[in-house]
Image (tube, rainbow, N blue to C red):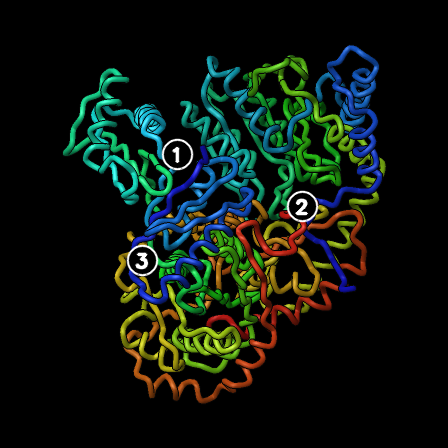
Amino acid sequence: MQDLLLVRYGEIGLKGKNQSFFLNTLMNRIKEALAPLGGGRCRRTQGRIFVEIKGDREAALDRLRKVFGIVSLSPTREVPLDLEVIKEEALAQLLLARERDGGSTFKVEARRANKAFPHNSMELNQLLGAHLLRNTTGFSVDVHEPDIRVKVEIREKAYIYSRVVPGPGGLPVGTSGRAVLLLSGGIDSPVAGWMTMKRGVTLTPVYFHSFPFTGDRAKEKVIDLCRVLAQYCGSLNLHVVHFTEIQKALNQHCPEDLGTLLMRRMMMRLAREIARQVEGKALVTGESIGQVASQTLEALHVTSAVVDLPVIRPLVGLDKEEIIKRAQEIGTYNISIRPYEDCCTIFVPRHPVTRPRLPQVEKAEEVLPVAELIAEALERTEVIKITERGREGNGFIHGH
Amino acid sequence: MEREVYLDNSATTRVREEVAAVVLEAMTRQYGNPSSLHRKGIEAERLVQGAREIIARSLGVKGEEIYFTSGGTEANNLALKGAARARSRRGKHIITTAIEHPSVLNTCAQLAEEGFQVTYLPVDGEGVIDPEDLRASIIPETILVSTMFVNNEIGSIQPLDQIAEVLAGAGQDIIWHVDAIQGYGKLPLKPRELGIHLVSISGHKLHAPKGIGVLYVAEKVPLQPLFGGGEQEKGLRSGTENVPGIAGLGRAAELALAEQPEASARMQELKERLVAGILERVPAARLNGPREGAPHIANISFPGVQGETLVHALEGVGIYVSSGSACSSRQPKPSHVLTALGLSREEITSALRFSLAPENGEEDIDYVLERLPQVVADLRLFQRR
């Protein structure tokens, strides 16, 4: 008998002609996710993917729970189409489920996809239910709200399981093109990135480093955030932009009350240029509406006005509490709350303009050599490849 | 290669090669457990005894009065908790100062939760307590006094001889602990002459490795141990001895002892050159704490610049210093020591600590004086207008 994980993928089943592309991408993501555990072979059958796993099943489940596109997972075993064997395996699954989660009622849910099998679904439910009752004590059948559902799928082989583990849903990363994420060390932007990846988008994160106004610990913090995001997508090419000269120019030549807005506009321009380099089709930010002065609708208009790509702001619908909860679930929260200052907190104006008008902002910017500043910052951009184990080529983490 | 000037020796020091050699030797050759009966054990025990005696000699005390710990923090915890708990039936009042290291202040806060009452003595503008305040704070329930020797942020030196007089005249049995982590090896300290009962020392401030410290415990002073275990260090500090660390600390103490008067005088000279040079060349710079003070620590504010930003800008030119103290720069709250001096917020957030080691030379100071004024001037352009 072969240990398998049954993967349900829901939404991507609806994608018509592109289905193959979506499924192949999903299977690649699954293989990548399992690579550290010795890999896993994937098989497709109608509406399902079966993954043959090596080694620790719980570890494999944990990793696949971070693969977008997976709706749910069930550990199962493949057995021959032999009623006696199926009965024994159903009994084993029932007892296993009780041991794991407790319960005193059950229901058998059989599904015969393979019509060559002599017993139909109804007959199977009855035969197996009777076998389970006869061979256990303390169980009764409840067809409406059972504690345990023993599911049996009859295909070329039989698959029996009693446990359904939720996956993250969404679409496999790599199926929706690429976007550039403006990543700070804060709570919001990693969540925004995660939500975008969930829709199948591949991310290129950009961090704006303002040394010495921001120390290298702030950069390490962003790298650690990328390590967490990489758990969901394999690897990321973090672009660290040298932002210091722009920060200085803004601080010296522009009105303080527009400082944050002008800074955001420069960041947008830089992200746009990086999108050009990596063939990104959109920008992603962690902005929400009304959270801070630079996030009024007027301010969002002023910052978006410098780019011709869609700016995706997945957090608009979330309150701070919801964002924090999401960050905790993703695993970025404890990194985000480390107390290193970043440039966003050092150069915050005392009395920021909350309802800026575009001509006012453009006028304030006129004194700046925008094109040169952008070109110079791009010139000094460092690209760091990051996987969940750390930055690539980091001898300490990869060891030996 | 870019020049590197390390002036953060109060955070930690570079381990000296002579010390590292002893440590390596103890790890790879005399690696036995001092408690083992066989020859390997005896070999290791001999290293521990040797270090114990060197440190005892440096303090003018007996070898049996030296106890090895995992570092300064543990030494301070063992001193305060050990003494307070052992004496709690006699009274529950502790006196310390407002500018102690967090390992003393937070330990006092824990003891306060256990029902002890703690008095924190204020300091003057130079970071020194008034012994009269101490005299006035002593009540019949007072069982423990803890005063630091050299302050880690500003280098102020507490008047231990005057404190000794006050305590001698108190007419009651009070245990006196001195946190000498920043002062040991830099300034002479003879606990027995002053009647100090407990002294904390840390290895890594003295060019020994991290993870090793000492508590001097005068004979017959009762302490309750923090750990239960194999009864090492006469039951006061269970746990297999950190033999390499101990051997390293012994060697470092030996070197410091041999070099001390000259090394300290040299550091004092360098410090004065640094302070005078900075005050002369950087407009509005202000020295915090005493002009005299410990030979190796100077704290200076640069109004108009954020301390952290200055730390980073200086690391950009190869100069390593601290803003506030290294332990507190991870917390956004302002330094309690600078606050106790009565400095303004601006002065506190713009403060840098320069801390020297005997291995620094004139060329290090001159390099700082060459680069720092420009770095400060550049950054001042980008502060709030």
| A323 is higher (above) or lower (below) than B381 | above
Asked whether the beta carbons under mark 1 and mark 3 sit within 8 Å of each other, the answer is no
Residue topped by disc 1: A80
Mark 2 vs mark 1: same chain?
yes
Mark 1 vs mark 3: same chain?
yes
Residue topped by disc 2: A399
Alpha carbon separation for disc pair 1 and 3: 27 Å
Looking at the image, which residue sits at the far left? A144
For label 1, the crowd category at 10 Å Cα-Cα, with few meaning under 14, some 14 to 19 and many 20 or more, is: some
- Secondary structure at numbered mark 2: loop
- Residue A13's label in the rendered image is 3
Asked whether the beta carbons under mark 2 and mark 1 sit within 8 Å of each other, the answer is no
Query: What amino acid is at disc 3?
Result: Gly
For label 3, the crowd category at 10 Å Cα-Cα, with few meaning under 14, some 14 to 19 and many 20 or more, is: some
Quarter of the rendering containing residue A82: top left
Reading the chain from its start, which is encountered first: label 2 or label 3?
3
Query: What amino acid is at disc 1?
Result: Pro
Looking at the image, which residue sits at the far top? B37
Q: Chain of mark 3?
A: A
Q: Nearer the viewer, residue B109 or B50?
A: B50
The residue drawn where x is 55% and y is 38% is B100
The residue drawn where x is 73% and y is 68% is B370
Q: Chain of mark 1?
A: A
The percent coordinates of residue B147 (x first, y second) are 58, 33
Quadrant of the snapshot with the N terminus of chain A:
top left
| B259 is higher (above) or lower (below) than B333 | above
Alpha carbon separation for disc pair 2 and 1: 44 Å
Quarter of the rendering containing residue B257: top right
The percent coordinates of residue A88 (x first, y second) are 34, 24
The percent coordinates of residue B37 (x first, y second) are 78, 10
| B340 is higher (above) or lower (below) than B305 | above
